[in-house]
Image (cartoon, rainbow, N blue to C red):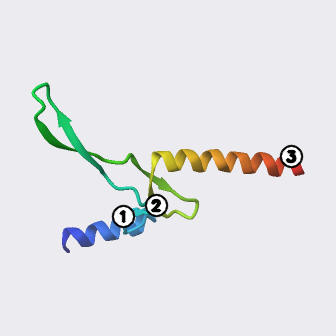
Amino acid sequence: MFYYDKVIERMKLLGGSLFMAKKITSKKPLFGNRRSHALNATRHMQKPNMQKVTLDNGEAIMMSARELRTLKKTSKEVETQVNEQL
């Protein structure tokens, strides 16, 4: 039995997903230059702050920290509106 087969078998026993988290955002790295005192330009990349989030159905997704914060905020607002109507 190959190592990969053992990993798949173990994931099935644990009830986990065999696939990596899906990326649902359209954010991409930001490119620019770092500038020294001598004004040398060195290419620089800033990656978005991607976080792995597990949904209620067990599916894992990747979303940015800002999107996650906004999602939590809006879900709290909707929950309070529903509770006020009841």
Describe the element under mark 1 as helix, strand or loop: loop
Describe the element under mark 3 as helix, strand or loop: helix
Q: Residue furthest right?
A: 86
Picture coordinates of residue 37 (x, y %)? 13, 25
Picture coordinates of residue 56 (x, y %)? 58, 60
Lower sequence index among marks 1 and 3: 1
Residue picked out by circle 2? 60
Q: Is residue 61 left or right of residue 82?
A: left
Lower sequence index among marks 2 and 1: 1
Do the CB atoms of the residues marked 2 and 3 lie less than 8 Å apart? no
Which of the image's four quarters has the N terminus? Answer: bottom left
Amino acid type at image mark 1: Met
- Residue appearing at x 10%, y 34% in the figure: 40
Of the pair 57 and 70, the residue shown nearer to us: 70
Amino acid type at image mark 2: Ala
Q: Nearer the viewer, mark 2 or mark 3?
A: 3
| Picture layout, residue 83 above or below residue 3 | above
Q: Quadrant of residue 4?
A: bottom left
Q: Residue furthest top?
A: 37
Of the pair 61 and 36, the residue shown nearer to us: 36
| Picture layout, residue 12 above or below residue 62 | below
Residue picked out by circle 3? 84
Describe the element under mark 2 as helix, strand or loop: strand
Do the CB atoms of the residues marked 1 and 3 lie less than 8 Å apart? no
- Residue appearing at x 75%, y 49% in the figure: 79
Do the CB atoms of the residues marked 2 and 1 lie less than 8 Å apart? yes
- Residue appearing at x 52%, y 62% in the figure: 58
Residue picked out by circle 1? 20
Picture coordinates of residue 34 (x, y %)? 19, 36
Lower sequence index among marks 2 and 3: 2
What is the distance, in whole Å, between disc 2 and disc 1 at their CAs?
Answer: 7 Å
